[in-house]
Image: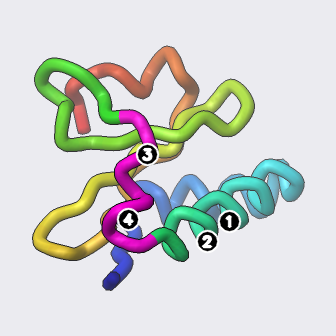
Amino acid sequence: MKITISNELNQTMAKLKKGDIALFRRVQKKINQISDCDGTTIHHFKNLRRGMSDYKRVHIGHFVLLFRIEKGVLIFDRFVHHKEAYRKSV
């Protein structure tokens, strides 16, 4: 499965690498874990609801990593605090 990381997530990861290296490593590990999943096992991650149902989520501490699958491409979009994760500004 092809993997794409959004510009917003790249910027967030750059800030994390400078500020909180432990959280940065946890996010990297989770991205690698999700990337290693095949097409059937990736569906065990929870979907968001209502207008954001095409996104899946995984919690890492107080933060949420949002990703989606489009036409066989795994797209990692955002890593934000859980209060911000469920707003429609994605």
Q: Residues within 10 Å of mark 4 (few under 14, many from 20)?
A: few
Q: Nearer the viewer, mark 1 or mark 4?
A: 1
Q: Magenta stretch containing residue 43, yes or no?
A: yes
Q: Where on the picture, by quarter, is residue 24?
A: bottom right
How many labels sit on residues?
4
Left or right placement of residue 40 versus residue 58 in this view: left
Task: Give the alpha-carbon distance from disc 1 to disc 4, as whole Å.
Answer: 16 Å
Q: Nearer the viewer, mark 3 or mark 4?
A: 3
Please report whichever mark, 1 or 3, sits nearer to the chain's N-terminal start: 1
Q: Which residue is mark 2?
A: 32
Q: Magenta stretch containing residue 23, yes or no?
A: no
Asked if the residues shown at circle 2 and circle 4 are in contact, with their CB atoms under 8 angstroms apart, the answer is no
Farthest residue, direction right: 22
Picture residue at 43% right of the left edge, 60% below the top: 41
Residue type at mark 2: give it: Asn
Please report whichever mark, 2 or 3, sits nearer to the chain's N-terminal start: 2
